[in-house]
Image (cartoon, helix red, strand yellow):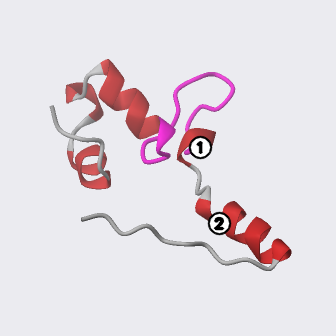
């Protein structure tokens, strides 16, 4: 099963996606929502919003820097 990348969401027709793939693409804000309240809107779920930006602001207020962890 392919990962939910922008390329997958944009290149695969919505009718050919499975339920989970479609909902993941909606949560990423790549394809429009289909509910009555948000029909046609591209809303990014809070799970996929950038957390690093808010974390950087918080650390900047405290006068600290983010330490990046290198993986080997």
Main secondary structure of the magenta stretch: loop
- The mark tally for this picture is 2
**Closest to the observer, 1 or 58:** 58
Please tell me the numbered disc located at residue 53: 2
Span highlighted in magenta in the image? 27-45
Mark 2 or mark 1: which comes first in sequence?
1
> SS for tag 1?
loop
**Closest to the observer, 15 or 71:** 71
Residue lying at 52% horizontally and 33% vertically, measured from the top left: 33
Residue found at the far right of this picture: 61
Residue lying at 71% horizontally and 62% vertically, measured from the top left: 54
Q: Does the stretch in magenta take in 46?
A: no
Where is residue 41, by image quadrant? top right
Q: Does the stretch in magenta take in 28?
A: yes
> SS for tag 2?
helix
In this picture, residue 34 sits left or right of residue 11? right
Say few, some or many: other residues with alpha carbon within 10 Å of mark 2 (under 14 / 14 to 19 / 20 or more): few
User: Which residue does the numbered mark 1 point to in the structure image?
Assistant: 43
Q: Position of residue 43 (x, y in %)?
A: 59, 43
Say few, some or many: other residues with alpha carbon within 10 Å of mark 1 (under 14 / 14 to 19 / 20 or more): some
In this picture, residue 58 sits left or right of residue 68? right
Residue lying at 65% horizontally and 66% vertically, measured from the top left: 53
In the displayed structure, 8 sits above or below 39; it is below
Please tell me the numbered disc located at residue 9: none
Q: Position of residue 64 (x, y in %)?
A: 73, 77
Of circles 2 and 1, the one toward us is 2
**Disc 2 + disc 1, Cβ < 8 Å:** no
Q: Position of residue 9 (x, y in %)?
A: 30, 44
Q: Say which quadrant the C terminus sits in.
A: bottom left
Residue lying at 21% horizontally and 41% vertically, measured from the top left: 12
Q: Say which quadrant the N terminus sits in.
A: top left
Where is residue 56, by image quadrant? bottom right
């Amino acid at each position: 099963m392919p990962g939910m990348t922008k390329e997958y969401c944009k290149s695969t027709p919505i009718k050919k996606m499975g339920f989970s793939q479609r909902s993941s693409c909606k949560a990423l804000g790549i394809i429009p929502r289909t509910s009555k309240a948000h029909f046609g809107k591209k809303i990014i779920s809070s799970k996929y919003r950038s957390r690093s930006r808010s974390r950087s602001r918080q650390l900047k207020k405290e006068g600290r820097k983010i330490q990046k962890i290198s993986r080997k």
